Amino acid sequence: MNAADRSELYQVLRERCDTIADSWYQTIRQTSHVAHSAARVRRHLAGLTEQAIAFLLTHPLEHGRAEAIGASAAGR
C-alpha cells in the first residue's frame, strides 16, 4: 500500500471511528455490565478505535503495539 492509499484509508476509517466505537459499546452493553458511565466507556472505545486504525496502517506491523491495544481493551 502506498502513502496515498494509506492516507485515503486512514480518512475513511477515521470518519467512521465514532460509529465503530459505538458499535463496540452496544455489543459490550448487551453482553456484560459495565461499571463506568456510558460516556467514559465510549471515550475509551473511541481512543482504542483510533489506536487500532493507526496500528492497522503501520508497516511493518508492530506486535508489541497490538498487544498493548489488546491489553487496554481488556482493562489491564
Image (spheres, helix red, strand yellow):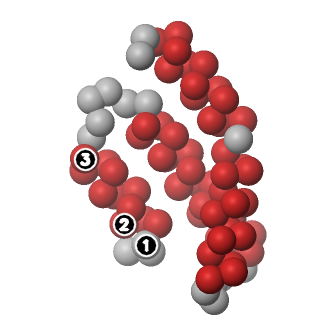
| Quadrant housing the N terminus | top left
The amino acid sitting under disc 2 is Ala
Using the numbered discs, state the Cα–Cα distance from disc 3 to disc 2 in whole angstroms.
12 Å
Residue behind mark 1: 74
- Mark number displayed over residue 9: none
Local secondary structure at mark 3? helix
On screen, 65 above or below 70?
A: above
- Regarding residue 43, the answer to whether it shows in the image is no
Image spot of residue 38 (x, y percent) = 74, 75
Crowd tier of the residue under label 1, counting other residues whose Cα lies within 10 Å: few below 14, some 14–19, many 20 or above: few
- Mark number displayed over residue 71: 2
Instruction: Tell me the residue at 72%/60% (across/down).
Output: 22
- Mark number displayed over residue 63: 3
Crowd tier of the residue under label 3, counting other residues whose Cα lies within 10 Å: few below 14, some 14–19, many 20 or above: few
| Mark 1–mark 2 CB contact (< 8 Å) | yes
The amino acid sitting under disc 3 is His
Local secondary structure at mark 2? helix
Using the numbered discs, state the Cα–Cα distance from disc 1 to disc 3 in whole angstroms.
17 Å
Image spot of residue 8 (x, y percent) = 60, 19
